[in-house]
Image: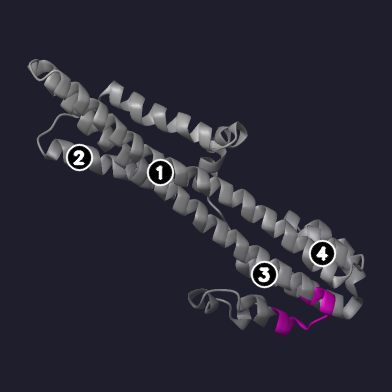
Amino acid sequence: MEMYIGIVGSLFIIIVGIFWGGGALGLYLDMPSVFITVGGSIFALISSFPLSVTKALPVYFKASTRKQNYDYADLIRTLSTFADAARKEGLLSLEDKLNEVEDPFLKKGIQPAIDGLDEEVLRSTLEKDMEKMNDRHALGRDVFDQFANLAPAFGMIGTLVGLIVMLANMEDTSAIGAGMSTALITTLYGAILANGIFIPVNKKLETVHNQEVLMREMMLEGILSLVHGENVRLLKDKLISFLPKDMRAQFDEEKFD
């Protein structure tokens, strides 16, 4: 939702600025400029990545707009409950509790722990899973980063095209106006696309990625603590230490006990 608000809000500010400055919206609508800036950027993007990656562009964009609810308190509470049960009844007692686990990464880690998988193998398996997630997320960010670079570049190409048209028809005053219009508007379109859409989407994907990485790092540490049979208090302290200082204050004793 925040992404939509930001994109629509930035476009609204630009439109208001146009009218406030005494301009007309029609002056800023130029199809050759759209064709050069948008079309050129898309085809250059296709040549930059495999087609399967380019086709996934709507999926990456949707990921940046989806509200993420990473409930760190609930994770700490869940792992604390599991740690208490494991110390009292053994890891096998967690088998019945696995149905309560919805996160696939957490379930993927706890099940081998119950089965007695070697700690180093378990750690290596989960870390490899996290590496693959990092690669997937990085690819999505790279697509929008490249798009943010291409849009202004093709805006500049459109500017050069417009200037060539204008200079080649200096004796035709109507051609001068059309050429200058294309020259300036393509640069504007490229700047709006890059700064109003692609760069914000890229940064939002980075933020979401960092939140998920933090969640998985806490899960990994919690799973290994279960294997070690650590007490609940130590487990809570270790997991809370992963959080930024401004988030730790909310995790008081009352929250979990």
In the picture, measured across the screen, residue 67 lies left or right of residue 257, that is left
- Element at label 4: helix
Kind of residue at disc 4? Ile
| Magenta stretch contains residue 234 | yes
Instruction: Name, please, the residue furthest toward the front.
Output: 168
Q: Position of residue 17 (x, y in %)?
A: 18, 41
Kind of residue at disc 3? Met
Would you name the residue on which mark 4 appears? 110
Would you name the residue on which mark 2 appears? 16
In the picture, measured across the screen, residue 182 lies left or right of residue 63, that is left
The answer to whether mark 3 and mark 4 are in CB contact below 8 A is no
Kind of residue at disc 1? Ala
Cα gap from disc 1 to disc 2, whole angstroms: 24 Å
**Marks 3, 1: nearer the viewer:** 1
- Element at label 3: helix
Q: Position of residue 200 (x, y in %)?
A: 41, 49
| Residue at the (73%, 57%) spot, across then down | 129
Would you name the residue on which mark 1 appears? 148
Residue 99, quarter of picture = bottom right
Q: Dot 4 surroundings within 10 Å: few (below 14), some, or many (20 or more)?
A: many
Would you name the residue on which mark 3 appears? 218
